[in-house]
Image (cartoon, helix red, strand yellow):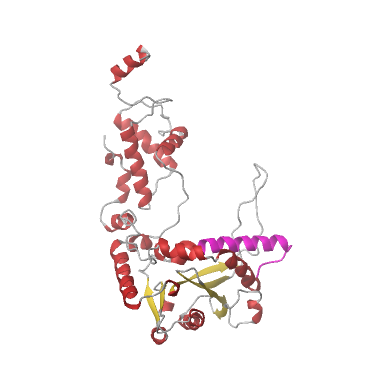
Amino acid sequence: MGIPFSSLQKRIKKGSTLAPHLGRFTVFSREQEAELANLVKKMANIFYGCTANQIRTVAFEYAEKLNVKHNFNQASKMAGRDWLHAFMARNNISIRIPEATSINRITAFNKTEVSLFFELLGQLMEKHKFVQKNIYNCDETGISTVQTPGKILAAKGQKRVGSITSWERGKNITLLCAMSSAGGYIPPMFIFPRKRMTPLLEKDGPAGALYKCSDNGWINKHLFLEWLAHFKQHAKPSADEPILLILDNHASHISLSIYKYCKSNHIHMLSLPPHTSHRMQPLDVSFFGPLKMAYKKECDLFLKSHLAKKITPYDVASLARKAFNNVASISKGESGFRSTGIFPLNPEVFTEEDFLAAETLQSETVVIAAMNLSQLPV
């Protein structure tokens, strides 16, 4: 067959039955690497992800424990960067920037709470037969007069690279948005941190938007009731076409007056489970991220086209209008509701892997013990 005698001899001596391949042999076998890769993925899924240096250290200790031949650094007791990059490429792993997630959010997003929400949602859909355009989600987010600068081009090796902002600390303005599963949007509500309103704050803002103020710029029960009247004006609920409004269980959304107003105006409210908005709130999933990115770009353009002029609360409505118009699309509304399983109704949208972190933290097993090499099979 034209196979060199030395190749056959080497395979017989080592007892190797692996298929031939180009390049040098890996330190670990495929099965051993798979175990290590599964550990890395599992730790990331339960929010205890490993850093590159931790994996390099574990690889060294793993090789020592298995007594396999390796060329890892004996002084640092770590695998090399070249090994790490090759390991990630072979096992579909990449270095990611994680999103900070509190323990409350991790433990609250569990199968019991999510199943109960979908059960209640299914009962409401069955009873009232909501049409797609009448299923809404509302939520608040904050925008500031100080934007986070984006990446810029600068000289290579330059020690200090800066980008202009208006202030050291900015004013925070609350923006209350609502979108439907058909991709429709209610004009937003602005809440400014001040005692009295002035028409100057509304300059060049979104058409039909509502402008209010509070002492700290946050929403409260009275302002939410005013927003509900604004919502009713645009959504037009009726006995023949009632509205389903999905929202979080913030204290400002809960009062007897709000309940009475919704009941008398054919608005049915359903609360999401506590601390689950990052996975189950359509606005959080598909809209607020792009909106804030677009707003940041508008702030950058404003500062670079108005020399030495600061962004004040009087400019926020105009900048938010441009960002809102660029981002608000039918596809974002539809994808937000689809990916959260709200419409079309899909209680199976989240898999067992999604609930793994909550189940692990709620059990009494010590998660960090997974990093112990004794967990890896020898």
For this view, does 199 lie left or right of residue 215?
Answer: right
Tell me the magenta residue range. 288-312
Q: Residue at x 68, y 66 (%)?
A: 310
Q: Is residue 198 above or below residue 342?
A: below
The quarter of the picture where the N terminus appears is top left
Decide which of 257, 69 is in the foreground and name it: 257
Q: Is residue 301 above or below residue 253?
A: above
Decide which of 361, 122 is in the foreground and name it: 122
The quarter of the picture where the C terminus appears is top left
Decide which of 209, 95 is in the foreground and name it: 209
Q: Is residue 310 magenta?
A: yes
For this view, does 2 lie left or right of residue 13?
Answer: right
**Residue 140 percent coordinates (x, y):** 49, 71
* Image quarter of residue 285: bottom left
Q: Is residue 55 magenta?
A: no
Q: Is residue 250 visible?
A: no
**Residue 47 percent coordinates (x, y):** 38, 53
**Residue 213 percent coordinates (x, y):** 56, 80
* Image quarter of residue 168: bottom right
